[in-house]
Each structure stands twice: as structure tokens, then as C-alpha cells.
């Protein structure tokens, strides 16, 4: 990802531009550096894959690095109560299948957190949340392809032959359901992304 980000960088990288590969659990990462703007981009949900059980400490870890605004973006967690129609059921089924597939091959699925959890965690860490907004999601073909592609790429790691065949058939079935819904509705509406803007509270 770092390599691809460097390649995709628009224009030449300046001396102050960096792509860093490190884990935030490392106390030396960016030690002593402070930034005007910090974008915490779909990060909290991903922590489960890289530093499980550390989510509650993430904003405390980031606090000394933020001078101005901090923005948090995230997907609101999928919840079964939103599966009231065929679109909701499909996205719920797709999300659960993807997570189950990752667990079966001994990997860790992401774990998303709702905005009220993030607001509480921000306040505890010395941030003042100033605004929050939700943006309804309309999932398209690219999403269905990427989620099921991720599953297909891991099929070879499933040792049990019968299970592998069953999973492969389910991938195909989900693909067909997804494409039929996109054809019917143009896109699949479900849930929302949110952005929370926060500012560091001056410490006495
Ligand atoms: C969903 S991705 C979003 C990344 C990027 N903003 C994008 O749009 O592609 C979340 C990122 O959080 C990173 N991440 C999760 N936990 C981390 C940790 N403990 N330390 C460093 N990075 C972490 C992952 O490596 C991943 O690149």
C-alpha cells in the first residue's frame, strides 16, 4: 500500500511529504512531531486488524500530535435492525460473509465503532468534538467486487475441500444478488459514513 501510495502521489513528493509504515503502538512513531490538521481516516475500525484491543487508547496516542483540527472518518457499524429490505439484507449478509471468511482463514476482520463511541473516546483523550455529520452510503459494483474479491483471494487458504467449495458457491451467489440489486436500484443504499471534527482542549 505504501508503494502504491508513493506511485499514486499527485506530483513530486516534497521533502516534508512522507509515507510512513509503522504501528501506532510504537511509542517512537512521530515522537515530538505536531501537526495543524490530523485526518484519522477509516482508522479506528481498522485497528482490530493491526493492534487488537487498543482502540480505546488511539486518541490519547494521537493527542500530542494534534495542534489544530482532528477529523475522524468511519463507517457506522452494520446492525441487523437496518436490514429491513432486500438491500439491507444483502449488505448485512455480504459483511457477515466477508468477516466469517477472514476468521476462517485465521485473519482478523475490522471492527467498526459508532459515532457516539468515538465522541466519548475523543472527550476522554482531551479533544472537544465540534461537529459530526453522517453521509448516506450507496454501494456500487466496485464495492461488491472488492469485498468478494477479498474473499475469493483467500479461498486457497481454506483447507477443508467441502467447505471451500461451499464458500466458493456462496461468493458466486452473493455476486449475482449484488449485481441484480445494482441493476434494479442503480446502487445499494445502506447505512452511512460519518465525519467528526474535534479540537484539542488546552491542558492547564
Ligand atoms: C481502512 S484503511 C484507510 C487507509 C487510507 N486512508 C485509505 O483510504 O486507503 C485504515 C488504515 O489504518 C491502518 N492501521 C490500522 N491500525 C493501525 C495501527 N495500529 N498502526 C498504524 N496503522 C494502522 C491500516 O494499515 C490501514 O491502512
Image (cartoon, rainbow, N blue to C red):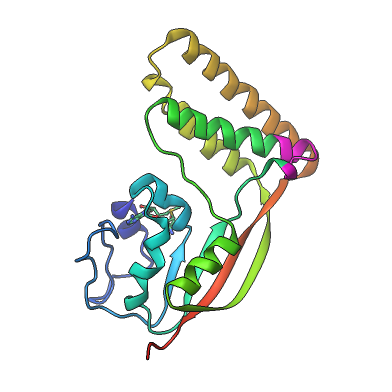
The answer to whether residue 36 is above or below residue 81 is: below
Taking the magenta stretch, the answer to whether it contains residue 199 is no
> Image quadrant for the C terminus?
bottom left
In the image, which residues are magenta? 81-89
Instruction: Please state the horizontal and vertical placement of residue 192, each as a whole percent of the image.
Output: 66, 56
Ligand 1 found in image quarter: bottom left
Residue lying furthest left: 28
Residue 182 visible in the shown view: no
Q: Quadrant of residue 137?
A: bottom right
Instruction: Please state the horizontal and vertical placement of residue 4, each as a whole percent of the image.
Output: 33, 52
The answer to whether residue 30 is above or below residue 46 is: below
Count of marks overlaid on the render: 0
| Residue at the image point whose x is 58% and y is 34% from the top | 96
Instruction: Please state the horizontal and vertical placement of residue 5, each as a whole percent of the image.
Output: 34, 57
Q: Nearer the viewer, residue 2 or 47?
A: 47
Residue 123 visible in the shown view: yes
Taking the magenta stretch, the answer to whether it contains residue 85 is yes
| Residue at the image point whose x is 38% and y is 62% from the top | 57
Q: Is residue 4 left or right of residue 113?
A: left
The answer to whether residue 103 is above or below residue 122 is: above
Instruction: Please state the horizontal and vertical placement of residue 117, each as a whole percent of the image.
Output: 55, 61
Q: Quadrant of residue 140?
A: top right
| Residue at the image point whose x is 53% and y is 64% from the top | 118
The secondary structure making up most of the magenta span is helix
| Residue at the image point whose x is 22% and y is 64% from the top | 27
Q: Is residue 48 left or right of residue 86?
A: left
Residue lying furthest top: 162
Amino acid at each position: 500500500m505504501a508503494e502504491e501510495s508513493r506511485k499514486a502521489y499527485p506530483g513530486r513528493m516534497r521533502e516534508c511529504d512522507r509515507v510512513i509504515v509503522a504501528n501506532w503502538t510504537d511509542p517512537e512513531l512521530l515522537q515530538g512531531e505536531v501537526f495543524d490538521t490530523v485526518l484519522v481516516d477509516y482508522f479506528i475500525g481498522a485497528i482490530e486488524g493491526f493492534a487488537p484491543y487498543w482502540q480505546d487508547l488511539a486518541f490519547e496516542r494521537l493527542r500530542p500530535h494534534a495542534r489544530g483540527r482532528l477529523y475522524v472518518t468511519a463507517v457506522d457499524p452494520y446492525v441487523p435492525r437496518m436490514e429491513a429490505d432486500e438491500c439491507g439484507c444483502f449488505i448485512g449478509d455480504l459483511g457477515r460473509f466477508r468477516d466469517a471468511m477472514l476468521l476462517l482463514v485465521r485473519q482478523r476482520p475490522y471492527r467498526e465503532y459508532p459515532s457516539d463511541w468515538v465522541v466519548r473516546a475523543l472527550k476522554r483523550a482531551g479533544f472537544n468534538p465540534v461537529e459530526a455529520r453522517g453521509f448516506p452510503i450507496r454501494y456500487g459494483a466496485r464495492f461488491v467486487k472488492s469485498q468478494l474479491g477479498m474473499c475469493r483471494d483467500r479461498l486457497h487458504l481454506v483447507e477443508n475441500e467441502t467447505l471451500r467449495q461451499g464458500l466458493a458457491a456462496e461468493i458466486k451467489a452473493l455476486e449475482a444478488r449484488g449485481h441484480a440489486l445494482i441493476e434494479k436500484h442503480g446502487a445499494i443504499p445502506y447505512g452511512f459514513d460519518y465525519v467528526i471534527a474535534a479540537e484539542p482542549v488546552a491542558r492547564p
